[in-house]
Image (cartoon, rainbow, N blue to C red):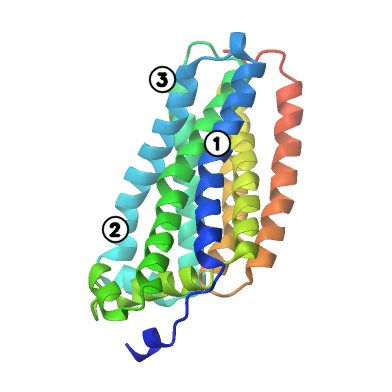
Amino acid sequence: MSELEKIVIGKESLPALILTILFMIIIPIVFFIYWRKKHKDQTKMSYLIAGMIGFLISARVLELGVHYVCLISKNPISHFLNTNTWAYALYGIVMAGIFEECGRYVIFKSIMKKHRTRENVVLYGIGHGGMEIFTVILPAMITYLVIVVLFSSGNIQNALKTLKMTKDNIFVILPAIKAAATFNFITMVLSIIERLLTMFIQIGLTVIVYVDVINTNKVKLLLAIVLHMLVDLFPVLYQRKVLSLGIAEIWLACWCIIIIFMALRLYRNENRIDA
């Protein structure tokens, strides 16, 4: 616990986290309001809901189920993946690419067969990306905020008791405490930029997958999976402390430009992406 006693909460941590949480809530709402207002007659709310549910099922239920076996449970596979950075990174990007892109494909192919307009495709992507923020990013930021508030009180033992830290889970909670303590306005700006880029990427990948459904071939589905894997590669390596946050953000921005360029060409080439 001596390492914990050395942790000092930065002065910027609390206001930066509060602002970050507010922006994370605002980002998907602004995307939705803008697109819905611009294309009210061409969009259906069912596509937004489908995107949200699609992310929950593919990423937060099915993919997490595999993660439980391969990363969380104690077995030879989880031990190998958790102790080998490159194996962990490869596993992570493959799982994310397959589950999320195949999830989009299955939903478009088997469920969302009506009102197949290109405007609805974008709305689905907004729902997918928005739900990622609400179920992955926001909980993490709120956790950081709780940590900052608890440690700011000055009673470290009480904070650790509230966080239920033990010798068994310290390796999980300690990195979160360090991240919360060092969170500042620069981290806030980078986090907001990362979410904006990711929202555009999710929309772009949705367009690519849907065009694959309409054209009844698996080329663009495979392309979307590979692109998703490439997008996630540097962020995963950043999480494993192989790369800096700045390099990961630049990587993300480059792939965002590439994916949006591809998606725009497909979007503009279809007056109506309609089956």
* Distance Cα–Cα, label 2 vs label 1: 29 Å
**At x 38% / y 39%, what residue is drawn?**
56
Q: Can residue 181 be spotted in the picture?
A: yes
Q: Is residue 226 left or right of residue 165?
A: right
Question: In the rendered image, which quarter is residue 214 located in?
Answer: top right
* Distance Cα–Cα, label 1 vs label 3: 24 Å
Residue 151 rendering spot, x and y as whole percentages: 38, 73
* Screen quadrant of the C terminus: top right
> In the rendered structure, which amino acid carries the disc numbered 3?
Ile
**At x 49% / y 35%, what residue is drawn?**
128
Of the residues under marks 3 and 2, which one precedes in the sequence? 2
> In the rendered structure, which amino acid carries the disc numbered 2?
Tyr
Q: Is residue 237 above or below residue 58?
A: below
Residue 271 rendering spot, x and y as whole percentages: 72, 13
Residue 220 rendering spot, x and y as whole percentages: 62, 35
Disc on res. 68: 2
